[in-house]
Amino acid sequence: MSLILKSQGPQNPSVKDTGELASSYKVSFYPSTDDYAFIAQKVSSAQEFPKLGQYGLQAFLAVNMFALPLVLWYFDQFLVGVIVFALELLFSIAILPSLMTSDFKQHYRTIYSGVEKDLLEVELTDEGLWCRHPATKVFVEWSEVKRIEETKSSIYFFFDHNGMVVAKSGFAYDDEKDRFLSFAKRHVKAFVTG
């Protein structure tokens, strides 16, 4: 599970030692459903929610959060109204966001239940990114890649309505990962470290 430096034309065995940029880079790793869930969250949060739906949801939350406790207070149920308000506040701040995150992860674990046991290969070339998996083979041109995001465990390539992951566990050494990222940054200007 190591980075393979490959140059077009005659092989140059000193490419790895000199730090020169090759014309393509490959990395193989076992993907994680958590990475697919991360991509789905990022892509869905980038999509604008329709205004009518947004206002409807906000109105629903406002009625539940404020109107119900006010009705209870009106009928001399002040303590019950405070408890209901506190529970709704706790639900909307702490519980609802974690439910949404775990729901994404559970969804991807169900859909891609076997994906973690097959080796995934990502290759960067001057033309774009290749992603090869036993079930699929995908090519994305660099012009379609909108940004690269790096986290502690993975590197993500995002395009309009999807993304591609490269697990850092596929790199044997940090300098391999650095050369891989340098090659990608030559083609994509938007880079985020997280």
Image (tube, rainbow, N blue to C red):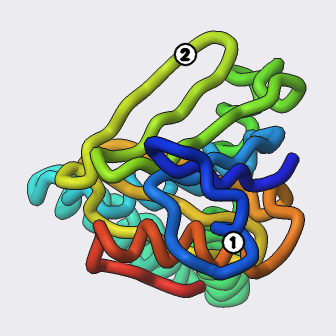
| Residue 69, x across and y down, in percent | 52, 78
Q: Report the residue marked by disc 2.
A: 136
Q: In this view, does 107 lie to the left or right of 127?
A: right
| Residue 185, x across and y down, in percent | 39, 75
Q: In this view, does 104 lie to the left or right of 140?
A: right
* Residue drawn at point x = 88 percent, y = 64 percent: 172
User: Would you call the spot at circle 1 few (<14 residues within 10 Å), some (14-19), or many (20 or more)?
Assistant: some
Q: What residue type is labelled 2?
A: Thr
Gap in angstroms between the C-alphas marked 2 and 1: 24 Å
Element at label 1? helix
* Residue drawn at point x = 29 percent, y = 67 percent: 187
Which image quarter: residue 123?
top right
* Residue drawn at point x = 18 percent, y = 63 percent: 55
Pick out the residue farthest to the front. 10
* Residue drawn at point x = 82 percent, y = 19 percent: 114
Above or below — where is 52 with respect to 79? above
| Foreground disc of the pair 2, 1 | 1
Give the quadrant of the C terminus. bottom right
Q: Which amino acid does label 1 sit on?
A: Lys
Which image quarter: residue 57?
bottom left
In depth, the one of 109 and 9 nearer the eye is: 9
Q: Report the residue marked by disc 1.
A: 177
CB contact under 8 Å: marks 2 and 1? no
In depth, the one of 50 and 32 nearer the eye is: 32
Which image quarter: residue 122?
top right
Please tell me which of labels 2 and 1 falls first in the chain.
2
